[in-house]
Amino acid sequence: MTMRVGVLTGGGDAPGLNAAICGLARRLLAAGSELIGFCDGWRGLITDSSRSLQHENFQHLLVYGGTLLGSSGDNPYRDPDVMVPKVLATIARHRLDALVAIGGEGTLGAADRLFREQQVPVVGVPKTIDNDLEATDFTFGFFSAVEVATRAMDDLRSTAESHGRVMVVECMGRHAGWITAYSGVAAGAEAVLVPERPVHIEELCASLLRLRQSGAKSAILAVAEGARVFKQGVCVSSMEKDEFGEYKTGGVAAMLAKSIQARLGWEARHVVLGHLQRAGRPIAFDRIFALRLGARAARLVLERRFGYMAAMRAGDIVEVPLQDAVAARKTLPNKFLDRYESFFMPIGGP
Ligand code: F6P
C-alpha cells in the first residue's frame, strides 16, 4: 500500500540535511510512497506550509549545504495547548501515514512527545554540528564543521607565527565541546577549552607563560563558545540567558584574548568562526552518512516501526528508541579528555 509521508528539518542547519532528505526520498519514492516536505521545521506543521517532493532532482541536491525545506527553531511544545492541536490538524489534513523529523535535541524532543503523547507515527534522523545527541556515535554535519574549524586553525598558524601572537579561536558548542576538541586536537592547538573542563585564567596564563619561556613564538587556543572560564574562583563566562532560557554564548574568545594580553604582555587576537562552521557543502563522509541515515528512516517508515531514530553505532547504521536519543545531552566523555590530556588545561572551578 502506498504511504503518504511528511518530512521536516528543524533547528540549526547542518551540512548533510539535503543528503538525508535524498536518502529518505529515494527509498520511499521507489516504494511508491508520496513525500511531502514541510517548510521551516515544526513551523511548517503549525502553519500548514508544505511542498511536494515528488519531482526534486535529489541526485543534484545532495551535494549542497543548508536544507531545501528551510529550518527554524519553532517547537510546538513552547505553547502546547495552542500549537500541538495545529500540528495534529495538519497531519490529519494531509492524511499522513508517517512523519520523519530530521533534527537535534529540540526537534526530536518534540517528535518523541508527539509519538508518546499523541500517537503520531514519527521516525527521527539525528543532525547537529554539535554532535551532542545521545544514542548515536555521531551526527551528520559534525565532521564537516570540524573540517572548517581545523582548516581555520591550520591557516591561522602562519599569521600567529609571523606576528608572534596568541590566536584565540572560538568554535560553536554551547554545552558540549565536540567541535572544539576534535578540531583543536587535529590542528595541534596549544590549549583546548571546552565546557566539560572549566579553566582558571590564572592557570591558563601560567601555562602560556611556561610555553613562551620555553621558546614558543605563537600559540593557538581553541575555545568552545560555552567554555567556562574562572577568574579568582568566579565564573567570568557569560551567565546571561536568552528568551528561551539558554545561556547567551559568544564573546569568550574576545575576553580571553584581552586577558592574556593584559596579564602576559603577549599580543593576542581572537577569531569567532561562528556560522561558517554550519555553512558550505558537506564533506563526502557527511553526505554518505546522511544518505544512509535517511535510507534507514525510510525503511522504518515502510515497516511501520515508529518512535525510533536512525543512528550510528560502531560504524553501523542501526535504529534506537527516539526517547533514548533525547534523554540526555551527550558531552565529551572523560575517556576522550584523558586520552588527549595534554591539550586540555588544568581542571578547576566547581
Ligand atoms: O546547535 C547548533 C548551533 O550551531 C550551536 O552550536 C550554536 O550555539 C547555535 O546553533 C547557534 O544558533 P543560531 O543559528 O540560532 O545563532
Image (cartoon, grey):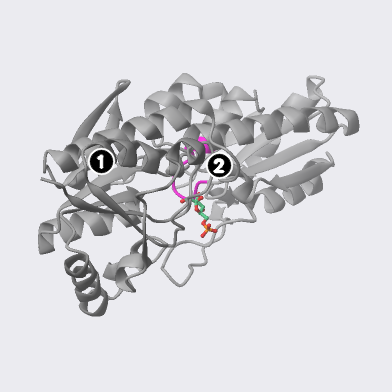
Mark 2 Cβ inside 8 Å of ligand 1 = no
SS type, badge 1: helix
> What residue did someone put label 1 on?
28
Q: Looking at the picture, which amino acid does disc 2 mark?
A: Val
> Is residue 151 a member of the stretch shown in magenta?
no
Which segment is the magenta one? Answer: 173-180
Residue 18: x percent and y percent? 45, 43
Question: On residue 287, which mark appears?
Answer: none
> Is residue 176 a member of the stretch shown in magenta?
yes
Residue 317: x percent and y percent? 27, 27
> What residue did someone put label 2 on?
199
Nearer to the camera, 321 or 167 = 321
Nearer to the camera, 153 or 216 = 153
- What is the spatial separation of the Cα atoms under label 1 and label 2, in whole angstroms? 49 Å
CB within 8 Å, label 1 to label 2: no
Circle 1 crowding by C-alpha within 10 Å: few under 14, some 14–19, many from 20:
many
Look at 65% across and 28% down and name the residue there.
189
Look at 60% across and 42% down and name the residue there.
280
Is residue 136 among what the camera can see? no
Look at 25% across and 43% down and name the residue there.
325
Nearer to the camera, 29 or 280 = 29
